[in-house]
């Protein structure tokens, strides 16, 4: 199996998003298949290094204020980050008895470093598109800053191959950046089923007791508190649901991203008596605690207005929880309406942004909560689909196939 140089903006234990979750699962799986990994990554917790059998990691640290100021990405900070990533990667590669055969980049933040390393080491470069900025920002009524468009465009134009995490991302890459179809491969993310089966903290029953007695139905949202996640729309739908089913409670498990949206969500809950009595803001949860929440929930909701893939749907499906999602991005590829869950439409605004169809979302929840037979059937089908279509093993096989094809092509060129 090849030696792979991973260049990434997140690597465990410093993983804070779906990108970090994906890289963590991918790296563990590649090591399990006998691949050797060299990892150059960014960390907000300070520079450090780690070495284990077949794995060497170097984290570089750039203060967040240098990367982002007043919500604007800073060109100087991005440049410094990429210089540090190059130095870290070269220290991992130079003198190694097993040099890398391919570079795999995650995130446009660190792509300039990956591109430099591609040319310096004369290696094929694969980049994974975890999302695309133009459709993501358009979904919430924003435009892409010039620097970000420049970096993402560079990634799409200069990679030897692009892995899209969904057909939706593939279509966006072709529409926005005119990426040739032969340069794109779709590899759906895989769900870590072993982690879902791990035991959790013993005191989670106490979490249910103050707000969700045994007779209550629990509706769970798990994800960040950010505009594209549609939590405000979910809370508006919850008002309708609670009025018709007063025994329903909501758990909102997610990280406040530090902007005005988290405050908006907290304000909605605090100032609506019907919500303040029935909604609990749980804050950020460890993955182990989150998996336990899935097992205690009756329904999981993914109300996003943009979702490149949708771990937030895949994980409850794997845990056997019925799901209601919007038709944003890659979510309909994960959840088949009426077969593995319920999919509700988004509403398009004149500005080009999207919003949650609050009435449709409320009706879908009520349908699931009032028809246990339907909920059980859809949850059972969803669980089976995860086992067949969204396993880590399948993701690894598809990814390794991409690696092998590029390595073979490069060897043929120089044969």
Image (cartoon, grey):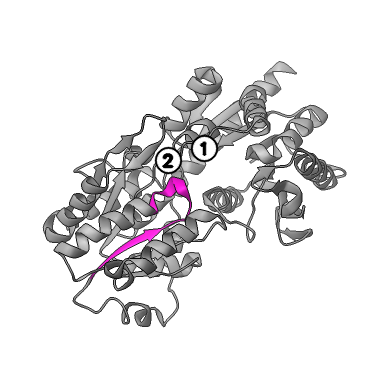
- Classify mark 1: helix, strand or loop: loop
Q: Position of residue 336 (x, y in %)?
A: 26, 40
Look at the image and give the residue range highlighted in magenta. 217-231
In-front residue for pair 267/284: 267
Question: Residue drawn at (69%, 28%), measured in percent from left and top?
Answer: 124
Residue 355 located within the stretch drawn in magenta = no
Quadrant of the snapshot with the N terminus: top right
Q: Which residue is mark 1?
A: 131
Q: Position of residue 378 (x, y in %)?
A: 20, 51
Mark before the other along the chain sequence, 1 or 2: 1
Q: Position of residue 134 (x, y in %)?
A: 52, 31
* C-alpha span from label 1 to label 2: 9 Å
Question: Residue drawn at (52%, 60%), measured in percent from left and top?
Answer: 256
Between tags 1 and 2, which lies in front? 2
- The reply to whether dot 1 and dot 2 touch (C-beta < 8 Å) is yes
Residue 226 located within the stretch drawn in magenta = yes
Q: In the rendered view, would you say 188 is above or below 225?
A: above
Q: In the rendered view, would you say 204 is above or below 123?
A: below
Q: Which residue is mark 2?
A: 306
């Amino acid at each position: 199996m090849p030696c792979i140089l991973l260049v990434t903006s997140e690597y465990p234990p410093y993983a804070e998003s779906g990108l970090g979750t994906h890289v963590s699962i991918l790296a563990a799986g590649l090591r399990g298949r006998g691949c050797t990994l060299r990892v150059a990554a960014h960390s907000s917790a300070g520079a450090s290094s780690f070495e284990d059998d077949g794995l060497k990691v170097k984290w570089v640290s750039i203060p967040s204020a240098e990367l982002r100021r007043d919500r604007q990405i800073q060109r100087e900070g991005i440049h410094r980050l990429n210089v540090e990533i190059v130095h870290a990667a070269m220290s991992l590669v130079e003198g190694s008895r097993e040099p890398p055969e391919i570079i795999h980049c995650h995130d446009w933040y660190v792509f300039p470093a990956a591109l430099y390393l591609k040319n310096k080491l004369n290696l094929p470069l694969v980049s994974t598109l975890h999302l695309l900025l133009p459709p993501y920002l358009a979904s919430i009524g924003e435009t892409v800053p010039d620097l970000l468009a420049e970096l993402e465009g560079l990634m799409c134009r200069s990679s030897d191959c692009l892995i899209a995490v969904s057909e939706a991302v593939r279509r966006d890459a072709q529409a926005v950046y005119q990426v040739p179809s032969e340069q794109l491969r779709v590899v759906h993310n895989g769900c870590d089923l072993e982690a879902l089966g791990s035991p959790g903290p013993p005191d989670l029953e106490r979490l249910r007791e103050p707000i969700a007695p045994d007779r209550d139905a629990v509706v769970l949202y798990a994800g960040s508190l950010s505009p594209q996640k549609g939590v405000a729309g979910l809370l508006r739908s919850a008002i309708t649901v609670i009025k018709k089913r007063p025994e329903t409670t909501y758990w909102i498990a997610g990280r406040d991203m530090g902007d005005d949206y988290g405050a908006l969500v907290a304000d909605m809950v605090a100032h609506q008596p019907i919500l303040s009595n029935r909604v609990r803001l749980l804050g950020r949860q460890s993955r182990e605690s989150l998996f336990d929440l899935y097992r205690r929930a009756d329904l999981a909701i993914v109300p996003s207005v943009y979702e490149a893939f949708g771990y937030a749907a895949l994980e409850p499906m794997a845990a056997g929880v019925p799901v209601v999602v919007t038709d944003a991005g890659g979510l309909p590829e994960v959840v088949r309406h009426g077969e593995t869950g319920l999919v509700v439409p988004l509403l398009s605004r004149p500005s080009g942004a999207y919003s949650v169809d609050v009435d449709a979302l409320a009706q879908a929840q009520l349908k699931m909560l009032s028809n246990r037979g339907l909920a059980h059937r859809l949850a059972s089908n969803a669980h089976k689909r995860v086992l067949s279509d969204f396993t880590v093993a399948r993701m690894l096989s598809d990814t390794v196939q991409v690696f092998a094809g590029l390595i073979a092509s490069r060897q043929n060129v120089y044969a």
